[in-house]
Image: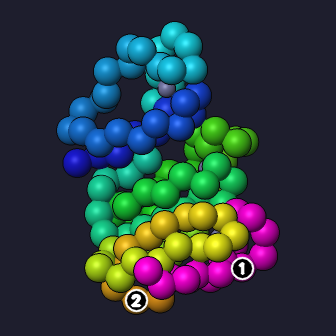
Amino acid sequence: MKMFLCKKCKAVVQGTGNPDGKGCPAGGMHDYTYIAETGPKLHLCSRCRILVSTFGEPAAFGCPEGAYHTWNLLGQAGTKAYACKKCSTKVELDSDPDPKNCPAGGVHQWKKG
Ligand SMILES: [Zn+2]
Ligand SMILES: [Zn+2]
Ligand SMILES: [Zn+2]
């Protein structure tokens, strides 16, 4: 599966081909950019705060909050739930998430549960 992001409304969609561009909530057509193949690695952009689960490093272009995403690898998808007290990002990983580059500034403050 391929993952796409609309940089106008921040919608993330998965599919095998280019998604239907009609009906963007931000007006007109969605402006989708291909991000990556879906996979088990969770990446968070510290600019737009979008969380994606991809096979490899996601594409850098098409960030809604600037020209390029700043992706940070948090870890491998799993069954342990964590939430950051600062940026409110919620993830489920197989180990403690990486603390670097919280979108709210500095390092994440991950809490289990
Ligand atoms: Zn859109
Ligand atoms: Zn971004
Ligand atoms: Zn955080």
In this rendering, the answer to whether 94 lies above or below 87 is: below
As drawn, the residue found furthest toward the front would be: 113
Image quadrant occupied by the C terminus = bottom left
Residue 93 position in % (x across, y down): 37, 79
Counting labels gives 2
Q: Amino acid at mark 2?
A: Ser
Identify which residue, 90 or 97, lies in the foreground. 90
Q: Amino acid at mark 1?
A: Val
Q: Is residue 86 left or right of residue 23?
A: right
Tell me which segment is drawn in magenta. Answer: 97-113
Residue 107 numbered tag? 1
Residue 106 position in % (x across, y down): 78, 76
In this rendering, the answer to whether 50 lies above or below 110 is: above
Q: Ligand 3: does it lie within 8 Å of the C-beta at label 1?
A: yes
| Residue located 44% across and 47% down the image | 35
Q: Residues within 10 Å of mark 1 (few under 14, many from 20)?
A: some
Which residue position is annotated with label 2? 95
Residue 30 numbered tag? none
Main secondary structure type of the part rendered in magenta: loop
